[in-house]
Image (cartoon, coloured by chain):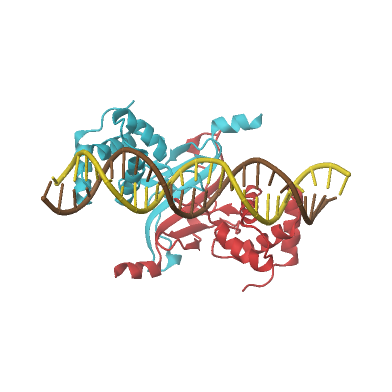
Chain colours: A cyan, B red, C yellow, D brown
Amino acid sequence: MKAELTNEKMERFFQQCRDAKLRITPQRCEIYKVLMECKDHPSADRVYERVKRILPNISFDTVNRTLLTFSEIGLAFVVAGSGDVKRFDGDMSSHQHFKCIKCKRIVDIRHDVFDNIDVPKELGGNFRVFRMNVLAEGLCEGCVESNIN
Amino acid sequence: MKAELTNEKMERFFQQCRDAKLRITPQRCEIYKVLMECKDHPSADRVYERVKRILPNISFDTVNRTLLTFSEIGLAFVVAGSGDVKRFDGDMSSHQHFKCIKCKRIVDIRHDVFDNIDVPKELGGNFRVFRMNVLAEGLCEGCVESNIN
DNA sequence: CTTACTGCAAACCATTTGCACGATC
DNA sequence: GATCGTGCAAATGGTTTGCAGTAAG
Protein backbone atom coordinates (compact mmCIF):
# COMPACT_ATOMS: atom_id res chain seq x y z
CA MET A 1 0.00 0.00 0.00
CA LYS A 2 2.47 2.60 1.15
CA ALA A 3 6.17 2.74 1.87
CA GLU A 4 7.16 1.98 5.42
CA LEU A 5 7.37 4.92 7.71
CA THR A 6 10.89 6.23 8.01
CA ASN A 7 12.88 5.40 11.07
CA GLU A 8 13.12 9.06 11.87
CA LYS A 9 9.39 9.40 11.97
CA MET A 10 9.03 6.44 14.29
CA GLU A 11 11.86 7.73 16.42
CA ARG A 12 10.05 11.02 16.70
CA PHE A 13 6.90 9.14 17.66
CA PHE A 14 8.75 7.32 20.43
CA GLN A 15 9.99 10.62 21.74
CA GLN A 16 6.53 12.12 21.67
CA CYS A 17 5.28 9.16 23.69
CA ARG A 18 8.02 9.57 26.23
CA ASP A 19 7.29 13.26 26.50
CA ALA A 20 3.66 12.44 27.16
CA LYS A 21 4.71 9.71 29.61
CA LEU A 22 3.12 7.03 27.49
CA ARG A 23 4.69 3.60 27.26
CA ILE A 24 5.76 2.37 23.90
CA THR A 25 3.73 -0.71 23.16
CA PRO A 26 3.41 -2.71 19.96
CA GLN A 27 -0.27 -1.74 19.79
CA ARG A 28 0.46 1.96 19.92
CA CYS A 29 3.18 1.60 17.30
CA GLU A 30 0.96 -0.24 14.85
CA ILE A 31 -1.95 2.10 15.38
CA TYR A 32 0.33 5.02 14.76
CA LYS A 33 1.74 3.49 11.60
CA VAL A 34 -1.69 2.69 10.22
CA LEU A 35 -2.94 6.16 10.99
CA MET A 36 0.02 7.72 9.21
CA GLU A 37 -0.43 5.52 6.18
CA CYS A 38 -4.20 5.97 5.92
CA LYS A 39 -5.11 8.85 3.71
CA ASP A 40 -8.84 8.29 4.05
CA HIS A 41 -9.51 9.75 7.48
CA PRO A 42 -10.48 6.42 8.99
CA SER A 43 -12.96 5.72 11.74
CA ALA A 44 -11.74 3.84 14.81
CA ASP A 45 -13.35 0.77 13.34
CA ARG A 46 -11.43 1.07 10.13
CA VAL A 47 -8.13 1.52 11.93
CA TYR A 48 -9.03 -1.50 14.01
CA GLU A 49 -9.55 -3.64 10.90
CA ARG A 50 -6.21 -2.66 9.48
CA VAL A 51 -4.22 -3.05 12.68
CA LYS A 52 -5.78 -6.44 13.26
CA ARG A 53 -3.98 -7.76 10.19
CA ILE A 54 -0.70 -7.20 12.01
CA LEU A 55 -1.85 -7.77 15.56
CA PRO A 56 -4.74 -10.24 15.33
CA ASN A 57 -5.42 -10.17 19.05
CA ILE A 58 -5.79 -6.44 19.45
CA SER A 59 -9.15 -5.24 20.70
CA PHE A 60 -11.27 -2.48 19.28
CA ASP A 61 -11.21 -0.75 22.63
CA THR A 62 -7.47 -0.39 22.57
CA VAL A 63 -7.59 1.10 19.11
CA ASN A 64 -10.30 3.54 20.05
CA ARG A 65 -8.65 4.49 23.30
CA THR A 66 -5.32 4.96 21.62
CA LEU A 67 -6.73 7.15 18.87
CA LEU A 68 -8.32 9.36 21.48
CA THR A 69 -5.05 9.49 23.38
CA PHE A 70 -3.24 10.47 20.21
CA SER A 71 -5.75 13.27 19.72
CA GLU A 72 -5.07 14.51 23.21
CA ILE A 73 -1.31 14.68 22.83
CA GLY A 74 -1.36 16.20 19.38
CA LEU A 75 -0.48 13.19 17.24
CA ALA A 76 -3.87 13.19 15.55
CA PHE A 77 -7.24 14.89 15.67
CA VAL A 78 -10.88 14.21 15.17
CA VAL A 79 -12.22 15.57 11.90
CA ALA A 80 -15.02 18.04 12.57
CA GLY A 81 -18.42 16.94 11.33
CA SER A 82 -22.16 17.10 11.92
CA GLY A 83 -22.93 13.77 13.49
CA ASP A 84 -21.72 10.42 12.14
CA VAL A 85 -18.95 8.34 13.63
CA LYS A 86 -15.67 9.95 14.64
CA ARG A 87 -13.09 10.14 11.87
CA PHE A 88 -9.42 10.53 12.64
CA ASP A 89 -6.65 12.32 10.80
CA GLY A 90 -2.96 11.88 11.43
CA ASP A 91 -1.91 14.70 9.12
CA MET A 92 -1.25 17.58 11.47
CA SER A 93 -0.31 20.06 8.76
CA SER A 94 -2.68 22.92 8.04
CA HIS A 95 -5.42 21.80 5.71
CA GLN A 96 -9.19 21.63 5.35
CA HIS A 97 -11.75 18.98 4.55
CA PHE A 98 -14.59 18.24 2.23
CA LYS A 99 -17.08 15.62 3.39
CA CYS A 100 -19.69 13.99 1.22
CA ILE A 101 -22.97 13.95 3.10
CA LYS A 102 -24.01 10.81 1.25
CA CYS A 103 -21.06 8.41 1.07
CA LYS A 104 -19.24 10.10 3.99
CA ARG A 105 -16.01 10.27 2.04
CA ILE A 106 -13.61 12.91 3.36
CA VAL A 107 -11.21 14.64 1.00
CA ASP A 108 -8.38 16.96 1.94
CA ILE A 109 -8.49 20.43 0.50
CA ARG A 110 -5.85 23.08 0.75
CA HIS A 111 -6.89 26.65 0.31
CA ASP A 112 -4.33 29.35 0.97
CA VAL A 113 -6.99 31.63 2.38
CA PHE A 114 -7.55 29.30 5.29
CA ASP A 115 -3.95 28.80 6.22
CA ASN A 116 -2.86 30.82 9.18
CA ILE A 117 -6.30 32.20 9.80
CA ASP A 118 -6.04 34.23 12.91
CA VAL A 119 -8.09 33.93 16.01
CA PRO A 120 -11.23 36.00 15.68
CA LYS A 121 -10.82 39.00 17.92
CA GLU A 122 -14.51 39.28 18.66
CA LEU A 123 -13.88 36.71 21.33
CA GLY A 124 -11.80 39.07 23.36
CA GLY A 125 -8.29 38.45 24.54
CA ASN A 126 -9.23 35.83 27.06
CA PHE A 127 -10.36 33.12 24.70
CA ARG A 128 -7.73 30.63 23.67
CA VAL A 129 -8.12 28.99 20.29
CA PHE A 130 -6.31 25.70 19.81
CA ARG A 131 -7.64 24.65 16.48
CA MET A 132 -9.49 26.04 13.48
CA ASN A 133 -11.63 23.60 11.54
CA VAL A 134 -12.87 24.27 8.04
CA LEU A 135 -15.30 21.77 6.65
CA ALA A 136 -17.08 21.88 3.30
CA GLU A 137 -20.12 19.64 3.14
CA GLY A 138 -21.82 18.50 -0.02
CA LEU A 139 -21.91 15.75 -2.59
CA CYS A 140 -18.83 14.21 -4.20
CA GLU A 141 -18.58 13.48 -7.91
CA GLY A 142 -19.85 9.95 -7.63
CA CYS A 143 -22.78 10.84 -5.45
CA VAL A 144 -23.77 13.80 -7.58
CA GLU A 145 -24.13 11.43 -10.49
CA SER A 146 -26.01 8.71 -8.67
CA ASN A 147 -28.28 11.40 -7.29
CA ILE A 148 -29.58 12.32 -10.68
CA ASN A 149 -31.22 8.93 -11.12
CA MET B 1 -36.67 36.43 27.59
CA LYS B 2 -37.06 37.62 24.06
CA ALA B 3 -39.67 39.49 22.11
CA GLU B 4 -42.22 37.33 20.35
CA LEU B 5 -41.40 36.38 16.85
CA THR B 6 -42.98 38.66 14.36
CA ASN B 7 -46.04 37.51 12.51
CA GLU B 8 -44.16 37.84 9.26
CA LYS B 9 -41.53 35.46 10.43
CA MET B 10 -44.10 32.90 11.49
CA GLU B 11 -45.98 33.41 8.26
CA ARG B 12 -42.79 32.72 6.37
CA PHE B 13 -42.29 29.60 8.47
CA PHE B 14 -45.76 28.37 7.57
CA GLN B 15 -45.00 28.89 3.92
CA GLN B 16 -41.73 27.01 4.20
CA CYS B 17 -43.59 24.13 5.78
CA ARG B 18 -46.15 24.09 3.00
CA ASP B 19 -43.40 24.21 0.42
CA ALA B 20 -41.79 21.21 2.06
CA LYS B 21 -45.18 19.52 2.35
CA LEU B 22 -45.01 19.48 6.11
CA ARG B 23 -48.13 19.93 8.16
CA ILE B 24 -48.30 22.86 10.50
CA THR B 25 -48.66 21.46 13.99
CA PRO B 26 -48.48 23.19 17.35
CA GLN B 27 -45.37 21.14 18.15
CA ARG B 28 -43.54 22.31 15.07
CA CYS B 29 -44.53 25.90 15.70
CA GLU B 30 -43.30 25.89 19.27
CA ILE B 31 -40.07 24.12 18.39
CA TYR B 32 -39.46 26.66 15.67
CA LYS B 33 -40.12 29.57 18.00
CA VAL B 34 -37.83 28.22 20.68
CA LEU B 35 -35.09 27.58 18.16
CA MET B 36 -35.33 31.12 16.84
CA GLU B 37 -35.24 32.60 20.29
CA CYS B 38 -32.38 30.47 21.56
CA LYS B 39 -29.07 32.13 20.99
CA ASP B 40 -27.11 29.37 22.68
CA HIS B 41 -27.07 26.69 19.97
CA PRO B 42 -29.16 24.28 21.99
CA SER B 43 -29.04 20.50 21.95
CA ALA B 44 -32.25 18.62 21.20
CA ASP B 45 -32.57 18.03 24.90
CA ARG B 46 -32.38 21.70 25.70
CA VAL B 47 -34.98 22.57 23.10
CA TYR B 48 -37.15 19.83 24.56
CA GLU B 49 -36.95 21.34 28.02
CA ARG B 50 -37.97 24.74 26.77
CA VAL B 51 -40.79 23.59 24.55
CA LYS B 52 -42.15 21.44 27.35
CA ARG B 53 -42.97 24.59 29.31
CA ILE B 54 -45.49 25.47 26.65
CA LEU B 55 -46.50 22.00 25.56
CA PRO B 56 -46.08 19.79 28.62
CA ASN B 57 -47.06 16.63 26.78
CA ILE B 58 -44.59 16.87 23.96
CA SER B 59 -42.10 14.04 23.70
CA PHE B 60 -38.36 14.30 23.26
CA ASP B 61 -38.62 12.24 20.10
CA THR B 62 -40.83 14.75 18.44
CA VAL B 63 -38.44 17.54 19.26
CA ASN B 64 -35.45 15.62 18.00
CA ARG B 65 -37.22 14.48 14.85
CA THR B 66 -38.46 17.96 14.15
CA LEU B 67 -35.05 19.54 14.57
CA LEU B 68 -33.62 17.04 12.12
CA THR B 69 -36.44 17.77 9.71
CA PHE B 70 -35.76 21.48 10.02
CA SER B 71 -32.12 20.80 9.19
CA GLU B 72 -33.17 18.94 6.08
CA ILE B 73 -35.38 21.66 4.72
CA GLY B 74 -33.02 24.50 5.51
CA LEU B 75 -34.69 26.00 8.56
CA ALA B 76 -31.78 25.08 10.80
CA PHE B 77 -28.51 23.20 10.78
CA VAL B 78 -26.35 21.07 12.99
CA VAL B 79 -23.31 22.90 14.30
CA ALA B 80 -20.13 21.12 13.19
CA GLY B 81 -18.10 19.65 16.00
CA SER B 82 -15.78 16.86 17.05
CA GLY B 83 -18.02 14.49 18.94
CA ASP B 84 -20.42 15.57 21.69
CA VAL B 85 -24.14 15.86 21.32
CA LYS B 86 -25.68 17.52 18.29
CA ARG B 87 -26.20 21.24 18.67
CA PHE B 88 -28.68 23.11 16.52
CA ASP B 89 -28.64 26.61 15.12
CA GLY B 90 -31.61 28.43 13.66
CA ASP B 91 -29.60 31.39 12.44
CA MET B 92 -29.12 30.69 8.75
CA SER B 93 -27.09 33.80 8.04
CA SER B 94 -23.41 33.40 7.25
CA HIS B 95 -21.41 33.14 10.42
CA GLN B 96 -18.89 30.95 12.20
CA HIS B 97 -18.56 29.33 15.60
CA PHE B 98 -16.25 29.08 18.52
CA LYS B 99 -16.74 26.10 20.80
CA CYS B 100 -15.20 25.67 24.22
CA ILE B 101 -13.78 22.19 24.52
CA LYS B 102 -14.37 22.23 28.24
CA CYS B 103 -17.79 23.75 28.94
CA LYS B 104 -19.07 23.12 25.39
CA ARG B 105 -20.33 26.65 25.08
CA ILE B 106 -20.76 27.77 21.48
CA VAL B 107 -20.32 31.42 20.54
CA ASP B 108 -21.07 33.02 17.20
CA ILE B 109 -18.21 34.73 15.47
CA ARG B 110 -18.33 36.79 12.33
CA HIS B 111 -15.18 37.20 10.36
CA ASP B 112 -15.36 38.90 6.99
CA VAL B 113 -12.75 36.56 5.59
CA PHE B 114 -15.08 33.63 5.93
CA ASP B 115 -18.13 35.20 4.40
CA ASN B 116 -18.77 34.11 0.88
CA ILE B 117 -15.85 31.74 0.87
CA ASP B 118 -15.93 30.03 -2.44
CA VAL B 119 -15.98 26.35 -3.14
CA PRO B 120 -12.45 25.02 -3.26
CA LYS B 121 -11.69 24.24 -6.86
CA GLU B 122 -9.34 21.39 -6.05
CA LEU B 123 -12.43 19.29 -5.86
CA GLY B 124 -13.09 19.61 -9.53
CA GLY B 125 -16.26 20.83 -11.09
CA ASN B 126 -18.28 17.80 -10.16
CA PHE B 127 -18.33 18.27 -6.44
CA ARG B 128 -21.27 20.19 -5.06
CA VAL B 129 -20.74 22.12 -1.83
CA PHE B 130 -23.86 22.94 0.15
CA ARG B 131 -22.34 24.33 3.26
CA MET B 132 -19.06 25.65 4.60
CA ASN B 133 -18.45 25.22 8.30
CA VAL B 134 -15.83 27.12 10.19
CA LEU B 135 -15.27 26.11 13.78
CA ALA B 136 -12.71 27.46 16.20
CA GLU B 137 -12.05 25.18 19.15
CA GLY B 138 -10.42 26.18 22.39
CA LEU B 139 -11.12 27.46 25.86
CA CYS B 140 -13.50 30.28 26.67
CA GLU B 141 -12.68 33.04 29.14
CA GLY B 142 -14.21 31.30 32.09
CA CYS B 143 -12.54 27.99 31.38
CA VAL B 144 -9.16 29.57 30.74
CA GLU B 145 -9.31 31.00 34.23
CA SER B 146 -10.52 27.90 35.99
CA ASN B 147 -7.83 25.97 34.15
CA ILE B 148 -5.06 27.88 35.84
CA ASN B 149 -5.98 26.48 39.25
C1' DC C 1 -61.64 10.77 4.97
C1' DT C 2 -56.89 10.25 3.90
C1' DT C 3 -52.27 10.82 5.08
C1' DA C 4 -48.97 12.65 8.05
C1' DC C 5 -47.46 13.48 12.89
C1' DT C 6 -46.98 12.40 17.63
C1' DG C 7 -45.83 9.84 21.77
C1' DC C 8 -44.29 5.77 23.72
C1' DA C 9 -41.28 2.02 24.07
C1' DA C 10 -37.91 -0.71 22.36
C1' DA C 11 -33.86 -1.05 19.48
C1' DC C 12 -29.44 0.57 17.98
C1' DC C 13 -24.86 1.55 17.87
C1' DA C 14 -20.84 4.14 18.69
C1' DT C 15 -18.37 5.07 22.57
C1' DT C 16 -16.95 4.54 27.42
C1' DT C 17 -15.91 2.32 31.74
C1' DG C 18 -14.45 -1.22 35.32
C1' DC C 19 -11.58 -4.63 36.20
C1' DA C 20 -8.20 -8.47 36.25
C1' DC C 21 -4.31 -9.95 33.73
C1' DG C 22 -0.16 -9.00 31.25
C1' DA C 23 3.53 -5.94 29.62
C1' DT C 24 6.66 -2.04 30.02
C1' DC C 25 9.96 0.57 32.34
C1' DG D 1 8.60 -4.83 41.31
C1' DA D 2 5.54 -0.89 40.52
C1' DT D 3 2.70 1.07 37.38
C1' DC D 4 0.59 1.52 33.10
C1' DG D 5 -1.74 -0.65 29.10
C1' DT D 6 -4.61 -4.19 27.19
C1' DG D 7 -8.56 -7.13 26.34
C1' DC D 8 -12.92 -8.46 27.66
C1' DA D 9 -17.48 -7.64 28.92
C1' DA D 10 -20.91 -4.82 30.49
C1' DA D 11 -22.85 -0.16 30.82
C1' DT D 12 -23.90 4.13 28.90
C1' DG D 13 -26.20 7.63 26.36
C1' DG D 14 -27.45 9.93 22.35
C1' DT D 15 -30.07 8.91 18.49
C1' DT D 16 -33.29 6.15 15.73
C1' DT D 17 -37.15 3.18 14.59
C1' DG D 18 -41.78 0.75 14.66
C1' DC D 19 -46.18 1.23 15.61
C1' DA D 20 -50.86 2.40 17.13
C1' DG D 21 -53.51 6.25 18.17
C1' DT D 22 -54.41 11.22 16.99
C1' DA D 23 -54.59 15.35 14.36
C1' DA D 24 -54.13 18.17 10.07
C1' DG D 25 -55.61 19.17 5.47
Residue A41 percent location from the top left of the image: 41, 38
The quadrant holding residue A142 is top right
The quadrant holding residue C11 is top right
Residue A19 percent location from the top left of the image: 20, 51
In the rendered view of the protein, which quadrant contains the N terminus of chain B? bottom right
C5 left or right of A74 in image: right
In the rendered view of the protein, which quadrant contains the C terminus of chain B? bottom left
* Picture layout, residue A83 above or below residue B53: above
Please say whether residue A91 is visible from this viewpoint. Answer: no
Residue closer to the observer: B95 or A26: A26
**Residue at 40% over, 61% down:** B102
Please say whether residue A50 is visible from this viewpoint. Answer: yes
* Picture layout, residue A68 above or below residue A130: above
* Picture layout, residue B116 above or below residue A106: below
* Picture layout, residue C12 above or below residue B105: above
The quadrant holding residue A12 is top left
**Residue at 46% over, 38% down:** A106
C15 left or right of A18 in image: right
D4 left or right of B46 in image: left
Residue C4 percent location from the top left of the image: 75, 46
**Residue at 68% over, 67% down:** B54
